[in-house]
Image: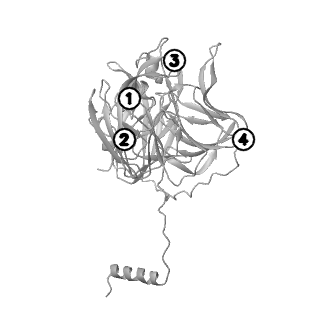
Amino acid sequence: MIQPVRFLVLASLTLAACGEVPPEVEPPAPWSAPVLLGPRAVLEDVNDDPDIVEVHLRAEFTDVDLGDGTLRPMMTYNGVYPGPLLQAKVGDEVIVHFENQIWEPTTVHWHGLRISDEMDGSPRIQEPVAAEGGVFTYRFVVPDAGSYWYHPHVRTNEQLEFGLVGPIVVHDPSDPVFDAERYVVLDDILIDGSRDVIAPFGSHPEMVHGRNGNVLLTNGRTSPAETGAARPGQVERWRIVNTANARTMSLSLTGATLRVVGTDAGRLDEPFETDRLELPVGQRYDVEVHHGAEGMTVLTSHVLGLNEAGEVEEFPIPVYEVAIAGEPAEAREIVWAPATTVDPRTVDESVELRFDAVDDPDLGLLWRINEQAFPEEPLFTFPVGHTVTMSLANLAGQEHPFHLHGQFFEVVGRPGLYDTVLVGGGETVEIVAHLDNPGRWMAHCHILEHAELGMMAEIVIGE
């Protein structure tokens, strides 16, 4: 019997004797991430392995210029606001060496990533990283392409308002190449008449409605200070996230057409065009922007406020602008690789989550889920792999962007998968949760003041 290795050698000699030497095959070029416009910095990968992203992240105090020439003391990641971009490709192992140099404990939550609960930044599982020198290494694999973000999960309403936010992109190497890609971080901030960011919970309305800032920010600068440039006819991919404490962003685009190609969980099977994007706190959209003729492409946030007559009115505020000029780009169609087919899921059970508030005589205003504020026991325990319809019933007049850690869900009547959904005052929204990631997972309102006042619970998947 001829051994396999010897057989290969003989076959090679036979080919050489016949003059049929196989041509040298060039190895495929290593994949490299596209340049993303918008982020202030990019975390440097210090690992040579192409399938491992290893970075250093530090929470610290920094004087920040929001674009008005005034330096304000804020909390930042690696000295920039928003924090530096963390990017990887699907399937990469990510290692983050985190150091905390602020004066209070903190964690890092990787919003939207379906990773281990031990790495999710929940202070109920991870001991918060000690102030002024504490360290912790986060290590996880990123399974899903999409646009995500990171922020603390300790005193979140304060630490996030003071600047601890940063963007994440998990790339799919098979995605089409665009003329440009942009990450647009939308936020607001409440500052006093001089220079300081106002401390949280300064008023009862803030406890009721959540903190709404008096300054809109785009990528950490006063809107619409962010301005880009493009040629007529260019096609770009914009990744848009709302990192505000409480404000829902109602967005429109002029000077270009907008096609939604992805939601919280990544790309859509069937993209769609729209005139208005409703972006609650924590949620993301990936959009194709097809620039028109010379002029300006303007992303506008429509903010509700009181006019001079004391009536509620919608005020359009430009938040991002791209100047369109130069030689028109050659017309082309963006072609996406076929989407992975997902088998339809059968619903295993149904539950209800009720959102309301009470005025406790000892503790003051409390926001609750299923009549509990900060429940110690999990709201529910489900087997791994279950598909559960959750009826989100808002019994209060204030809206609640509901966020579920570690899982994705469908929103009945909408395309795509999400990890955050807005439930308006007095509204009931049905979601179908795909509970595939085992662990203890936070479920809460992403109006951060509501979460800090009780609207924070856990759901257990598995044992």
Distance from the alpha carbon under mark 2 to that under mark 1: 23 Å
The residue tagged with tag 1: helix, strand or loop? helix
Which amino acid type corresponds to the residue marked 3 in the rendered image? Gly
Q: Which residue lies furthest to the top in this view?
A: 193
Mark positioned earlier in the residue sequence (1 or 4): 1
Distance from the alpha carbon under mark 3 to that under mark 4: 35 Å
Identify the residue position indicated by label 4 in the image: 327
The residue tagged with tag 4: helix, strand or loop? loop
Percent across and percent down for residue 13 are: 41, 82
The residue tagged with tag 2: helix, strand or loop? strand
Identify the residue position indicated by label 1 in the image: 156
User: Which residue is depicted at the point 63% across and 24% down?
Assistant: 314
Mark positioned earlier in the residue sequence (2 or 3): 2
Identify the residue position indicated by label 3 in the image: 69
Question: Label 4: few (<14), some or many (≥20) within 10 Å?
Answer: few
Which amino acid type corresponds to the residue marked 1 in the rendered image? Thr
Which amino acid type corresponds to the residue marked 2 in the rendered image? Val
Question: Label 2: few (<14), some or many (≥20) within 10 Å?
Answer: some
Distance from the alpha carbon under mark 3 to that under mark 1: 27 Å
Q: Is residue 204 toward the left or the right of residue 339 in the image?
A: left
